[in-house]
Amino acid sequence: MLFELLSDIVKINDVLIITKNIGATCEIRSNSLTIRQNEKWITIGDNDGPAHMHINSEMIKSAEFVKEQKPDRISFSVRFFDVDNQRIIAAFFTKMYDESKNLISEREFLYNSLNEKYSSKIKF
């Protein structure tokens, strides 16, 4: 189910996929990304392209759809966690608001549709 969820996410434009640790952060945009799995490794992006990431599918144990209230908006994301509930990667849905800071209903629909398909909290 992890591969299917990530596949659905990378099909949506303007999703920022972020890996982060104490020393570095990597961000890639979902626009036109490929995804494939070879044994335990899920690769998002093209190995020969300017950016890609390899995800050890055995380390990701859960995912959660998160709507987080910010001072002037709501942030929409899907966060992926290891066995210790530490975030491994996150997919942030960007361009959710228009220039007047109004939520774009089509973007919200995409997020909510994924949430309904997979449920708010997922165990792998």
Image: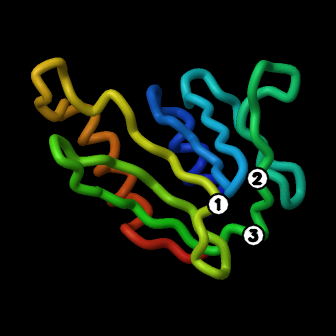
Q: Is residue 105 above or below residue 65?
A: above
Structural crowding at the residue carrying mark 3, measured as other residues with C-alpha within 10 Å and reported as few (<14), some (14–19) or many (≥20): some
Q: Camera-side residue: 39 or 100?
A: 100
- Return the residue at label 3: 59
Residue positioned 56% across, 29% down in the render:
29
Q: CA distance from mark 1 to mark 2?
A: 9 Å
Structural crowding at the residue carrying mark 1, measured as other residues with C-alpha within 10 Å and reported as few (<14), some (14–19) or many (≥20): some
- Using the image, tell me which numbered label, if any, was put on residue 88: 1
Residue at the farthest front position: 23
Residue 1 appears at what percent x and percent y? Answer: 61, 63
- Return the residue at label 2: 55
Residue positioned 56% across, 30% down in the render:
30
Residue 100 appears at what percent x and percent y? Answer: 10, 22
Residue 43 vs residue 118: left or right? right
Residue 62 appears at what percent x and percent y? Answer: 57, 72
Residue positioned 40% across, 51% down in the render:
77
Q: Are marks 1 and 2 in contact (CB under 8 Å)?
A: yes
Q: Quadrant of the C terminus?
A: bottom right
Q: Camera-side residue: 82 or 5?
A: 82
Q: Are marks 3 and 1 in contact (CB under 8 Å)?
A: yes
